Image (cartoon, grey):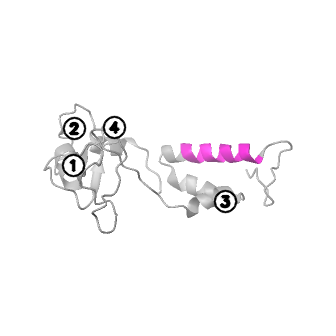
Amino acid sequence: LQVVEPDNSTRLPGLELNLVREWYLAYIDLLQQMCLFTSATYLIKKSLDPFIGALNQQSTTIHESCPRCGKALQPSPSSPTHTSAIKACQNCRRRVGLCFLCHEPVKGVFVWCPGCGHGGHLDHALLWFGGPSGKTVREVCPTGCGHRCNLIQSVSAFPRTDS
């Protein structure tokens, strides 16, 4: 159902354009939380509202925070390109980006638990949580924080879509 006309007016008399946009944004957010990325993208793409349509033109940004103090991580001024090559939190000086099993810096794919924030190399997470066969081996975080963050089980708990 298109509620917004190409001239940015609404099809329903007395309905504010900003309210309709809030409805769209809330529904798109709900679809994304349910891992229905294809449906969310389709809604954005088919919307006649240029404000909603512009969502597909934006890039994705991930903001990291220190697992110890919770402060946002900033690129190190000493790194030549100011990329995500962060070695330590500028607030508490804790080293970050280390694997939760081997304690070495992760330079490839970094996976983490959204619950406790700990993570590491993908291969090490698979060994700890899933074992070589993918069968569940452990459910508790290897750092000793006590969180039940079985990443293998968490991935299979989400509904799969064609995204």
| Disc with the residue nearer the chain's start (1 vs 4) | 1
Of marks 2 and 1, the one in the foreground: 1
Helix or strand or loop: what does disc 4 sit on? loop
> In the rendered structure, which amino acid carries the disc numbered 2?
Cys
Instruction: Determine the CA span between mark 2 and mark 4.
Output: 10 Å
Magenta residues span: 17-30
User: Residue 55 at what x, y percent from top left?
Assistant: 59, 58
Say the numbered circle drawn on residue 95.
1
Q: Pointer 3 and pointer 2: residues touching (CB < 8 Å)?
A: no
Give the labeled residue for mark 3.
46
| Disc with the residue nearer the chain's start (3 vs 2) | 3
Give the labeled residue for mark 4.
115
> In the rendered structure, which amino acid carries the disc numbered 1?
Arg
Q: Pointer 1 and pointer 4: residues touching (CB < 8 Å)?
A: no
**Mark 2 nearby-residue class (10 Å; few <14, some 14–19, many ≥20):** many
Instruction: Determine the CA span between mark 3 and mark 1.
Output: 45 Å
Helix or strand or loop: what does disc 1 sit on? loop
- Main SS of the magenta segment? helix
Give the labeled residue for mark 2.
141
Total of numbered circles in the picture?
Answer: 4
